[in-house]
Each structure stands twice: as structure tokens, then as C-alpha cells.
Image (cartoon, rainbow, N blue to C red):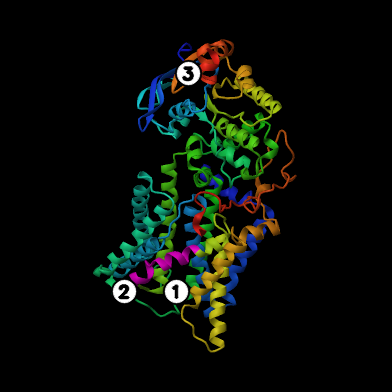
Amino acid sequence: MADAPLLDVIGVSRSFRGLKAVSNASLEVARGELVALIGPNGAGKTTLFNLVAGALAPDAGRIVFDGRDIAGQRPDQVCAAGVGRTFQIVRPFADMTVLENVMVGGFRGTARRDLARRRAQGALQSLGMWALRERPASSLTLPDRKRLEVARALATEPRLLLLDEVMAGLRPTETDQMVEAFRRLARETGVTILLIEHVMRAVMALAQRVYVLHHGEIIASGTPQEVTRNPRVLESYLGADAVH
Amino acid sequence: MNAWQDLKAVVTEAPVRSSAALLVLLAVLLALPLVLDRYLLSVMILILFFAYVGQAWNIMMGFCGQLSLGHALYVGLGAYAAAALYQHFGVSPWIGLFVAVGVCVLAASVIGWLAFRFGISGTYFALLTIAFAEFTRIGFDHFDWVGGSGGFFLTVVQQDRMDWVNLRGHPVMFYYLALGLAVLGFVVSAWLLRGRSGFYFRAIRDNEEAARAVGVDTFRYKMLAVQVSAALTALAGVFFAFYYNNLFPEQIFHISRSIEFILAPIIGGIGTLFGPILGAAVLTLLSEGLHEALAAAGYEIPGVKQILYGVALALSIMFLPHGIWPAIARRFGFHRTRAEPDGGADGPPADAKAPRPPAGPSQSQSGVPVVSTSSPRGGARG
């Protein structure tokens, strides 16, 4: 049981008007693992996330989460199953306070307000945002909005957290703080994390394994060190001419 | 059980200042019939009626972001259902109201299902609500069982006796009924806002996709908002039928009626608890006052009420785009932030305010949620 991966994406494809955004992609994330998904812009990373999170249905392939095929389920059903996600382009509930934003997540599977609030408090504290709780979400800076995305997803108490470029635009010290927060979370709650990230500083510090997506296909996987030495990966980022 | 605790908390956890103000207001309203003459009493009934319908509409648009421009449909259906049962079969309106609510929830479910299943939203959803109200109006024009376009009339009795069972009698009775409705609308709104439904409604209003991602079944909750709003509006219809005793499809289902219903919450403060009440009071007093002043000066200008509504709406959009209430709440400190018991392990105590954000009036520091003009569905004013 413990050997079965928490998330098993098997041969998933998705096209938009004939253009293959994700093509026969497979990846596995084990329980408690921190895995990064990297690749050049337009590689299909966010599309793959949307397929896992239920925002899009795959044309082919299976997505097995905790032994259940969740491919094609609605986002709220995937969330209820235990998958939390953030959006690359932040989507705060602008007219609600920070605490209220996160409480929306805290109500997952319960109508109890006190429980929702406790979950929200825990999520905000773990990201160092508790002092901002009465601020309207619309007044937050971009880095704080990114953290709010994470806190809101965390409050749903997910077993798998999908993080879409939450470090983009952060200063190096802020990146380090967030890396530390995720490490602590993984240690304390056992949450499994799959993250899309361009900030290699964060990828190298956090990820135990890395998948590289290029033109919708997984072209490499391994430890961060292995992947960054892989010629195909360098080629995909820098272009064939630069390598050969 | 849980619902009851939430309901209790609406009362016990409200800021002391607001609770006190609310109690004073309620006491004054309860005592008013002792001092008001018949005319002023009828004005008060009008205010409470519009406050109540505004609150019902506000649940759908202000809380959940679903713009209805056809709420006259529910007032009309509720009115006709209870009136027909009473006039044809002698059924008490207290029984008839259940039928009225049932009919309206059914109609709302059909509209909601069509819209939300097939992805009709925003402006197109608003147009759909207008369409339903309009073809129902035309249908009732030819519905002979309830008088068709010639109107439907309830038997009027001597006004000095009060028949609470059949709601026949003196305006004072209707005043207290209208007050009861307004209190009901307020309590239901406050209770919804506090619980999970309210959080989910507001999340849907602010960003539907993000709401889905944190586990909100958006179809289900949008349906709930529409159904609750319709059910409450049905009661307004029952009240309307028994207060006015005559129903004409051309009046009760007309789009101008739908527009009239939504002015109070928009001017008072969309998405807030007090906005619809305040808006109804301001609008009704202004229009009645103007009418009286003109009459005293010897003028009779038809349509002056509509002009006044237009001017009030324009002024509100220009100077108080979030309505009158949020500005007042900020000024007099009716915050709800204090209501949150501070369970803080870190962070400052609850009354140490976070630094004032640079954002404009869209902040919710007034303690009540406010629809910002920039939010995708805050377009009621646009």
C-alpha cells in the first residue's frame, strides 16, 4: 500500500484545436515526496496541472490519486479527494479579508465555522501571514497574494499540494523562507508536494526528484543534479545550437 | 444543531455597538404605529416591503454575484399563488405561502438549472431572468382563472377589524407583517453570511474558478442562492397580494418593477446587511417627500418618481459607488472585525488594526462584504 504512488499520471494527453499541449505524459509522486515539474515556457506544465486538478479533462490516459481514477472529475471533487492547488495567476477573493479567503478553503468537508477558522489559522500561521488576517485580499502585494494562494489551498488539508510557480517574483530571501515553510509542512503534516517552478534556487533546495516537460512530453526525470546535467534538458532550455 | 448555534452567534457575536443600535431601531419600529397617521404608516410599509425584497435579491446578487433583473417574477408568482388559493378555495394565506414558496423555488430552479448547467453567466444570465419574467407576464395576461389582463381582486373587508388568519384588515396589521418580513430577511441574510454558504457565495462572487479549486460545488451553491432568494421573494408576493388586494400582470411582473426592487440595495450598499434597508428608506422617503412637496406647491408631475430614482442612482454611482451604508459603517465604527474571537497564538490582538491598506473603498473594513466595481460580476451598476 505504501509502495503505491499517491499520484500516478499514466499516459495523459490533451490537445487544443489539434495542438498537443500535453502528449502521453506519465509521472509518479510517492507519498511524502517533494517533486518538481520544470520546463521551458509553453511546455504544457500548467495544462498538466489543470488535468490533475480537474480544471480540464484529458483526451486520453489515466490519473490515479490514492488508488482512485480522478481523470475528468470536477475541480471541487478532486479537491474533496485531497488535492489542493494554487493558480499561477493569483485568484484571490478580492472583496474578502485574508482570513475569510483562507476560511473558504477551511470549510472543505465541514460546515463547522470554528473548524474552518482553526484550519485557516493554522495555514496562515505556517506561512507567517496571521498578522495580515484582517486585511482585504485586494490590498495585498503580489508576494503576499502568492502566499495567500498557498494558505487557501493548505486550509483544505490536502494530501497532495499542487503549487504553480508560487516563488515567481519573490526576492531570494523570500524564496528561502517559503522553501523552509514547505519543508516544515512536509515534515510536520506529511503533505506531498508537486510544484511547477522556474526558480531553480527553490527547485534545487526543495525537490527530491524533478520531471522535465518539453513540448508536452516528459523528456527527463531524476534528481535535480542529474536533470540539470542531462543534455536533452539543456537543449530544451537553450536551444539545440547552444549545446552542439 | 449547528445551524442553531450559528443563528445564536449572529446575535451574540455581533459588535456591541451594532447590536445596541439594532435593538434601538427595532424598538422604534415596533412603537411607530402608536404615533404615525395612516399616510405615514403606508410609507413605512412601503419602506419595509422594499427593504425586504432588496434583501432577498441581495442574497443572490450581493452575496453570490448572480444578477437577477427579473425578481418581479417571484413577487408575481407568490402573489398570484396565495391570492388564487384564498379567493377560489378560501385557503388561508398562511397555508398559501407554502405553495407560493414552492412555486417560486421551482421557477428559480428551472432558471438556475438552465443557466448554470449550460454556462450562461453575467449579462446573459440577467437577460434570462428578464425573459422568464416577461413571458410569465404575457402568460398571465391570458390566464383567465386569475382574471387575465383584467386583473385579479381579493374581497376587501371593513378595515376596523383584524383577521390575522386571512390577513384581512387594518394597515397596522400589515405594518407589523412587513416589519416581520424585514426582520426575517435580515436574520436569514446575517445567518447565511456567517456560515459556510455565505463564505461559498462570496467566494463564487469574487472568483468562481478559485472557489471550485478549494472545493466549492459552484453549481450547487449558485442554485442554493437563487432558490433562497426566490423563496424569500415569494413571501413578499404574498404580502403584496393581501395588502393591495388587486393584481395586474402588467404591473406586478413588469420589468420596471424588477428594476425598482434592485435600486434600494444598490444605492444602500450591495452585498451588505443594512444596505437594502437603508436604501429603501432613503429612496422611499425622497420620492414621497418630493411628491408631497410638489403637491403642496400645486404641481402634479407624472413620472417624477422615476426621474428621482434615476438621479439617485446616478449620484450614488458617482459619489458612493459602494452604496451609502459602507460609508456610514466606516464613519460610525460598526465593524464586525471585533466579532471574531481572537484565537491568536501569534499576531496582535483583534483590535490592533492592521495598517490601513492603500486600496480604495473596496475594503471590507466596514465589517460587511462589499462588491467592488472591479470584480467580474459586480456589474450591477455598469
Chain to which mark 2 belongs: B
Q: Tell me: residue A131, above or below residue B282.
A: above
Inspect the image, locate mark 1, and give the three-letter code of the amino acid beneath it: Met
Inspect the image, locate mark 2, and give the three-letter code of the amino acid beneath it: Gly
Mark 3 highlights which residue?
Answer: A6
From the top left corner, tell me how far across and down residue B153 is, in percent: 33, 74
Q: Nearer the viewer, residue B359 or B80?
A: B359
- What secondary structure predominates along the stretch shown in magenta? helix
The answer to whether residue B116 of the structure is visible from this angle is: yes
Residue span colored magenta: B248-262
Q: Nearer the viewer, mark 1 or mark 3?
A: 3
Looking at the rendered structure, the number of numbered marks drawn on it comes to 3
Inspect the image, locate mark 3, and give the three-letter code of the amino acid beneath it: Leu
From the top left corner, tell me how far across and down residue B232 is, in percent: 44, 57
Secondary structure under tag 1 reads: loop
**Does the magenta-highlighted stretch encompass residue B286?**
no
Q: Do marks 3 and 2 share a subunit?
A: no
Q: Nearer the viewer, mark 3 or mark 2?
A: 3
Q: Earlier in the sequence, mark 2 or mark 1?
A: 2
Q: Nearer the viewer, residue B83 or A63?
A: A63
Residue under the image location 52 percent in, 67 percent down: B48
Q: Tell me: residue B139, above or below residue A172.
A: below
Mark 1 highlights which residue?
Answer: B162
**Image-based side of B10 in relation to A236, left or right:** right
Secondary structure under tag 2 reads: loop
Q: Do marks 1 and 3 share a subunit?
A: no
Q: CA distance from mark 1 to mark 3?
A: 69 Å
Q: CA distance from mark 2 to mark 1?
A: 25 Å
Mark 2 highlights which residue?
Answer: B151
Q: CA distance from mark 3 to mark 2?
A: 66 Å
